[in-house]
Image (cartoon, rainbow, N blue to C red):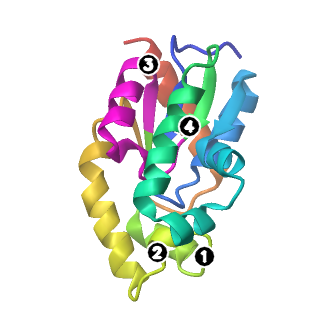
Amino acid sequence: MIFPLPKPLVITGMMGVGKSTLGARLADYYGLDFIDSDKEIVQAAQMSIVDIFEKFGEDYFRSGEERVINRIMQRPLPFIMAVGGGAILSPQTKELLQQKAVTLWVDVDLAVLWKRLKKSKTRPILHTEDPLATLEKLYQTRRADYQQTDIHVNVLTDEDIAITCDIVIDKIAQYATK
């Protein structure tokens, strides 16, 4: 299938929405490279995200995330990239993606997110006394930034990734014909 967008597709949304799984499927469908910015960060830092958070803190992680996403965006086009849930909170990253990418927000109901994340040990931002309250706060705080994306897909249930992928492909086609 021919990729209908003139820019890379960058998938954003809360942790646990399935950005990486969806991105890999879309890349297969369109015959494009898929890049997971979190994996690129781990490779560049030579340590896990949990370790980065524990040793250096969130600000250090976000700074590295900015640099990695900036580097990825210099690659030849087109490609599909999934970014971490907090990546668009950086004004520099947000501006870069608004200028050089088509952004897709995958929005999943908070109850579904909690079901997926409540036992996760790999989400350092949820390593708090009350992880559900932290997740709710993040969800509410980030919504305004997510709403500024080009394409919005609302997945209200814990549906099959194939269904979500089909919905996204339709939304991409609609966006491309605007």
- Mark 1 residue crowding within 10 angstroms, few (<14) / some (14–19) / many (20+): few
In the rendered image, residue 8, in percent from the top left (x then y), is placed at 54, 22
Q: Nearer the viewer, residue 80 or 67?
A: 67
* Residue bearing the label numbered 2: 126
Q: Amino acid at mark 3?
A: Lys
Mark-to-mark CA distance, 4 and 2: 23 Å
The residue sitting at 33% across, 47% down in the picture is 89
Magenta residues, start to end? 83-104
Rendering quarter of residue 111: bottom left
- Residue 100 disc label: 3
* Residue bearing the label numbered 4: 68
- Residue at disc 4, secondary structure: helix
Q: Are marks 1 and 4 in contact (CB under 8 Å)?
A: no
**Label whose residue precedes the other's in the sequence (3 or 2):** 3
In the rendered view, would you say 26 is above or below 102? below
Q: Amino acid at mark 1?
A: Ser
Mark-to-mark CA distance, 3 and 2: 31 Å
Q: Nearer the viewer, residue 48 or 151?
A: 48
Q: Amino acid at mark 4?
A: Val
**Label whose residue precedes the other's in the sequence (3 or 1):** 3
| Residue ranking furthest to the bottom | 129
Mark-to-mark CA distance, 2 and 1: 9 Å
Q: Is residue 178 visible?
A: yes
The residue sitting at 34% across, 43% down in the picture is 90
In the rendered image, residue 103, in percent from the top left (x then y), is placed at 43, 31
**Label whose residue precedes the other's in the sequence (2 or 1):** 1
- Residue at disc 2, secondary structure: helix
